[in-house]
Amino acid sequence: MSVGGPDAITLRAIAREMGMTPNAIYGYFATRDDLATELIRDVSTDLADVLDASWARTKRSSPAGRIRAWANAFRAWSLENREGFRLVFGDPIPGYKAPEGGPAPDAIRRICLGLTGLAALAWPYAAPGADTGTFRWSDFDPLLCDEVRTAFPELPPAALALALRIRSRLHGLVTLEVYGHLQGVTPAPEKLFDADVADLLNTLRLGPQDS
């Protein structure tokens, strides 16, 4: 996959890379979709572990500091695991059919709750300027709503919308960088990312807090 991306996921290709015969690898995975599901689950769990660790390390930091640390952890992981990023967030695997509930429901739940945690930190500052009447819980996936309302019972649906908007901001420049679209544009993509995070913090009315 590191050479051909998600399109290269075949049992024969994986077997060849591992020095195994295709028949041998079929003893572990009955189909290519089973293999792809396992890869997606492993990658997603690794990312969730990294983000959870960042959250735990910064529990004494300011809201702005915790959001900045989470953002930096996400970018660092993405650049160190470009093919994993593409597998989870980018190119769909041709013909792949995910299992019911998705390939990595636990990891995705943890990541979503982490993003909602960021929104919860920002909400006391962002709420006065937010249009809290725009969103209803019915605007979001029921299972996600149940998770969020259990973990953050004080948050309104507008805060979940804020979490998704934070995600879109963090993914933007990281996606361009992972796919190489900033090459030839800037030799310092980290400065662009830092500036974008600073702008996000200002949008959330947190200001330039660094700790």
Image (cartoon, helix red, strand yellow):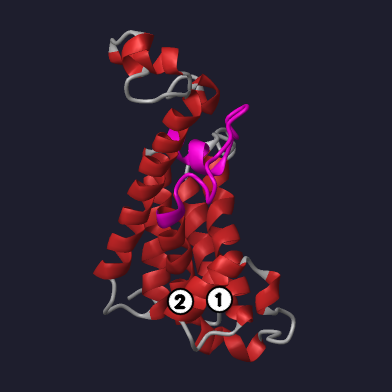
Residue in the image at 48% along x and 19% along y: 10
Residue in the image at 60% along x and 59% along y: 168
Which of 52 and 80 lies nearest the eye of the viewer?
A: 52
Q: Of all residues shown, which one is farthest toward the right?
A: 134
Q: Is residue 162 visible?
A: yes
Which of 46 and 68 lies nearest the eye of the viewer?
A: 46
Above or below, 88 relative to 115: above
The local crowd at label 1, few if under 14, some if 14 to 19, many if 20 or more residues have their Cα within 10 Å, is some
- Magenta region: 82-106
The local crowd at label 2, few if under 14, some if 14 to 19, many if 20 or more residues have their Cα within 10 Å, is few
**Residue that carries the numbered disc 1 in the rendered image:** 202
Residue in the image at 63% along x and 80% along y: 158
Q: Residue 188: x percent and y percent? A: 47, 45
Q: Of all residues shown, which one is farthest toward the bottom?
A: 128
Which of 194 and 32 lies nearest the eye of the viewer?
A: 32
**Residue that carries the numbered disc 2 in the rendered image:** 208
The amino acid type, in three-letter code, at marker 1 is Asn
Q: Residue 107: x percent and y percent? A: 40, 54
Q: Residue 134: x percent and y percent? A: 74, 81
Residue in the image at 60% along x and 69% along y: 142
Above or below, 104 relative to 147: above
Quarter residue 70 falls in? bottom left
Assign the magenta stretch its main secondary structure.
loop
The amino acid type, in three-letter code, at marker 2 is Pro
Which of 56 and 42 lies nearest the eye of the viewer?
A: 42
Q: Is residue 16 visible?
A: no
Q: CA distance from mark 1 to mark 2?
A: 7 Å
Q: Residue 108: x percent and y percent? A: 46, 55
The answer to whether mark 1 and mark 2 are in CB contact below 8 A is yes
